[in-house]
Image: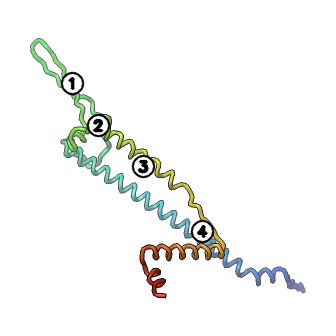
Amino acid sequence: MNRSAILFDDAARHEFLTGFHKRKLAKKEAAKKKAIERDKQQRQQERREQRQMLRERAAQNAAEVEKAYGAAASEEWHGVIDNQPEEEQYEDEDVLATVAIVEDFDPDTLLHGPSRPAVSNLEPAEEKKQKKQKKTIESEPSKRTKPKKIKYQTKAARKSERVKQHARRTEKAELAGGRASRRKHRK
């Protein structure tokens, strides 16, 4: 008969008994990573859907604009067609005339009116004011990037600071005729 012996490994037993905390932390870390990845995938999917919705809306808006300007209405919009100048031919007994109609068309001028004058047409005072505003706007981000200085104090230093501040406050109150000065006069 073939007898199989069971070997007892004391190191493996010790690892199993003392490894509960390690395994629990490993499971927790794996769950965190999985949740982060799931959230990332969800955000990417939402962005894809948002971009698709914006594409569809842009196509719909473009089709409506084309329709509003008298273009041939089609079910699907294929982008702006590069319009070649229209050519019309007029024939007379002696002359054949070909007329090409070229029109510079800007829909913004119809919707919003003629463009506004450039900044340089403003009065010098207004121009300086706008330049100053631009400089302040540009300089603001650099202020935000500087880290705050944190001053750490010992317990004794904080206590002495509080005592000094209290003394200053009471002195100011006395000068202003506050409650501290009234107490002093009663005594």
- Total labels: the figure holds 4
Q: What amino acid is at disc 4?
A: Lys
Name the side, left or right, on which 64 lies relative to 34.
left
The CA span between labels 2 and 1 is: 43 Å
The CA span between labels 4 and 2 is: 59 Å
From the image, state whether disc 2 or disc 1 is nearer to you: 2
Q: Is residue 93 above or below residue 160?
A: above
Q: Residues within 10 Å of mark 4 (few under 14, many from 20)?
A: few
Q: Front-most of 55 and 1?
A: 55
Q: What amino acid is at disc 1?
A: Ala
From the image, state whether disc 4 or disc 3 is nearer to you: 3
Q: At numbered mark 3, what does the secondary structure look like: helix, strand or loop?
A: helix
Question: Residue under circle 3?
Answer: 137
* Residue 25 location, quadrant: bottom right
- Name which residue lies at 89% across and 84% down: 2
Q: At numbered mark 2, what does the secondary structure look like: helix, strand or loop?
A: loop
From the image, state whether disc 1 or disc 4 is nearer to you: 4
Image location of residue 159, percent across then percent down: 61, 76
- Name which residue lies at 39% across and 44% down: 132
Could you tell which of marks 1 and 3 lies nearer the N-terminus? 1
Could you tell which of marks 1 and 4 lies nearer the N-terminus? 4
Q: Locate the N terminus and report the quarter of the image it occupies.
A: bottom right
Question: Residue under circle 2?
Answer: 123
Could you tell which of marks 3 and 2 lies nearer the N-terminus? 2
Q: How is the image coloured?
A: rainbow
Image location of residue 110, percent across then percent down: 20, 41
The answer to whether marks 1 and 4 mark residues whose Cβ atoms lie closer than 8 Å is: no
Residue 66 — which label?
none
Image location of residue 142, percent across then percent down: 51, 51
Residue 33 — which label?
4
Q: At numbered mark 4, what does the secondary structure look like: helix, strand or loop?
A: helix
From the image, state whether disc 4 or disc 2 is nearer to you: 2
